Image: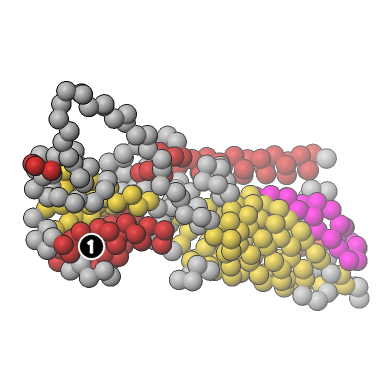
Amino acid sequence: MMERNAILLAGKKLLMTSLICSSVLFAAQSEYKYEITPMISGAVTEGNLDLDRNYANAGLSLGINLDEDSMFDQIELGFLQTLGDVDYKNSTSNTSVSRFFTNLIKEYKLNEKSSLYALAGLGVEVYGNEQFSNETGPFGNYGIGYKYKLDNDMAIKTDIRHLVSLDNGNNNLIYTVGLSIPFGKKAAPEAPMMKEEPKAEPMKEEPKVLDSDKDGVIDSMDKCPNTMSDVSVNAQGCMKMVDLKIYFPINSSVIDENYTHRIKEFAEFLKKHPKIKATIDGHTDYTGTEKYNLWLSKRRAESAAKALEKYDVAADRLTTIGYGETRPKATNKTKEGRAQNRRIEATISK
């Protein structure tokens, strides 16, 4: 009983360590709801188990990706089954071993392609032929792993797991290699709804003036008529800043096809005014390190520039710059505010 309590205490200490690490490292979030991972593994048994020291397994796991506000990134459900039977030492007997497990996973992003992850959870191991203290029962496990994302959104995963029987304290070491296949892509974030300022009613005695492009400058003083929507203009009605209203999922620099009309509209404006140049500004929320956010914001700006070039906007008319998390337009304390901050804008110059 004392040995079992010591094992449980060690598991609790490991879980607390994982939580502390998660508060200071950058957590990764997936653009998919699920991932399925076929895997192969090896097992190294404790010496007193009277089993072959090494044997092979194969199995499958299902990862359920959690929301970005969750403390953990994924719940893993899976199983491993020995490839053939495992021999008992000093005996003619053998046994199959099946293990079923549920783990909580926390992922720590290294760059856009690779990340580390920690896991901890519980399971049950089933022996087809129980002998020499090898008995069916529950186990706790914890481990660390490495994940490398391929260009097709699949990923190679490898990890090492320490399994401890909760009945007798027996130990097994499991090392796995698998191919993660994501599915169930999450919908692109919708553009945040902005509250409209109430429009002042015109005084009845004032004559009606026209502002055809609704930029705040009347037509008689507007030197740049027909400006596109959602722009900041100077006193002559010419654009200074364009809010392209293009937003990104967390950790992504890929422009969703739902925003194609905004890219096309801005490209048409630039082609109508060939003397105008634009600086594309990329922004992030405050999730992650300053260095990573600066790099990610630059990638977002470059993605927008490449999209404009596809509509025949000359590359020498576009400059890209990343501001990282330094210029939020909304609070970073809420999910909605962070969604507004993951954006791109454009500054106009001649």
> In this rendering, is residue 74 above or below 53?
above
Q: Is residue 148 left or right of residue 159?
A: left
Compare residues 148 and 118 and report the one nearer the observer. Answer: 148
Comparing 31 with 124, the one in front is 31
Is 35 or 229 nearer to us in this picture? 229
Q: Residue at x 27, y 41 (%)?
A: 327
Identify which amino acid the numbered label 1 is placed on: Glu
The quarter of the displayed image where residue 317 is located: bottom left
Residue 104 in the figure: left or right of residue 322: right
Q: Is residue 225 above or below residue 158?
A: above
Residue 82 is situated, as x and y percent measured from the top left of the image, at 77, 71
Q: Can the viewer see residue 303 in this picture? A: yes
Q: Which residues are magenta?
A: 120-143
Query: Of helix, strand and loop, which mostly describes the magenta segment?
Result: strand
Residue at 25% x, 58% y is: 266
Q: Quadrant of the N terminus?
A: top right
Left or right relative to 337: residue 103: right
> Would residue 168 be found to the left or right of residue 271 on screen?
right
Magenta segment includes 219? no
Magenta-drawn stretch contains 141:
yes
Position of residue 130 measured from the top left corner of the image (x, y, whole percent):
90, 62
Q: Name the residue rendered at 22%, 70% in the picture.
A: 312
**SS for tag 1?**
helix
Name the residue tied to disc 1: 268
Answer yes or no: is residue 319 visible.
Answer: no
Q: Is residue 300 above or below residue 233?
A: below
**Which residue is found at the position 18% from the left and 41% from the top?**
211
Rendered-image quadrant of the C terminus: bottom left
Q: Residues within 10 Å of mark 1 (few under 14, many from 20)?
A: some
